[in-house]
Image (cartoon, helix red, strand yellow):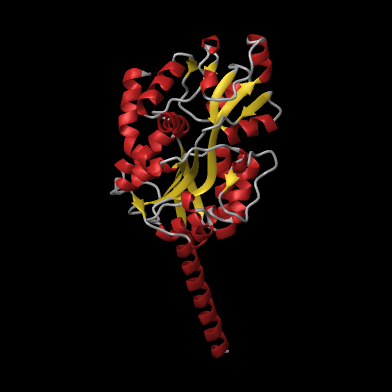
Amino acid sequence: MKKKVFINFVSILVLFFATVSFSCKNKSEELYIYSIIHDEETKALTDLFTEQTGIKVSYLRATTGELVNRVIAEKNKPNADILLGGASSYHIQAAEAGALEEYESPLAKNIPAYARSSDGTWTGFCVLTLGIGVNKSRFAQKFPNQKIPQTWEDLLNEKFKGEIVMTNPVASSTSYLFVQDQLQRLGWDKGWQYLISLSSLVGQFPDSGSAPPKLIGTGEYALGVAYLHALAKYRSLGFDIQLVAPPQSVGDVDAIAILKNTKHLSSARKFVDFMLSKEAQELMSSIDFTIPVNPEAVPVQGAIAIADIDLIDYDTQKAAVQRNEVLEKWALEVK
């Protein structure tokens, strides 16, 4: 009888310590994310990650400029583990400020070289390309004898004054990419001439990159500059939008990075691996019409393929180095 009681006591102890160990493990396995991508995509991705790994995720969603500035300011004592989203030039800026951790995921070797940094501080998970969105009904009503713009230069039509929407590059990576597109394809002086001329025709400069597709889709503006994938998403929802991919456009990647001095390095690395996976990138494409960088991932039907877009040879390093100078000049001379 005593032997049986002893065995039961030992079994209870083993079960107790196993439970404590499991609870402690789960407690340490958590993740905090600063997210630049939309809330819908962030929630879907983090839910799937938690389902696959059991790691609890919390996130803060805000604009690119706000979160990148926060990452740099908090670099010695970060309040998050991951920066999710934002064009590569912003991640380069954060890396040069010493705010990012180096990590090369095993899955990174399968993605194109342009989609990852040489030092492992950031990795792209989807391709971003800019284009022109047109609300066909409003455009036909406002400009019955005008052709729909097919090039960036076509937007510089005085008749379009007040009917164009684009984001504020000080707050939005979408618009900063557009600004760099003009500066790099035309050169510094001619690029600024273009930007100043266009800005005088713009009716609104919202801070969020998600605003122009919505404002175009709902017919508040006839024309706008936005990511093609965001415009494609609104078109799929039944909005009267035509997509135009102008020649000499720019392509970049939405990137992910681990923050320096993170308290949850293991969980952060697992999340980077997850974001480079076929499942995660196909999930994001199904929601947001993005183009995956993982060659095994299949983009959703209706997304515009990179092969169908004429892209300039975009210098991400130059875009990162010039960022402060460009935004100061924008604030002084444009808006």
Q: Residue 219: give x, y in percent of width and height.
A: 63, 18
User: Toward which corner of the image does residue 139 lie, by quadrant?
Assistant: top right
- Viewer-proximal residue among 333 and 217: 333
Q: Residue 173: give x, y in percent of width and height.
A: 44, 34
- Residue 263 located left or right of residue 304: left
Q: Residue 300: give x, y in percent of width and height.
A: 67, 44
Would residue 226 be seen by someone viewing this image from the given angle? yes
Q: Going 55% across and 50% down the picture, which residue do you hit?
A: 293
- Determine whether 193 is above or below 250 in the image: above
Tell how many labels: 0
Q: Going 39% across and 20% down the picture, which residue do you hit?
A: 193
- Determine whether 123 is above or below 232 in the image: below
Quarter of the picture holding the N terminus? bottom right
- Viewer-proximal residue among 314 and 26: 314
Quarter of the picture holding the C terminus? top left
- Viewer-proximal residue among 145 and 44: 145
- Viewer-proximal residue among 93 and 66: 93
Would residue 38 be seen by someone viewing this image from the given angle? no
Q: Going 56% across and 81% down the picture, which residue do you hit?
A: 8
Q: Residue 13: give x, y in percent of width and height.
A: 49, 76
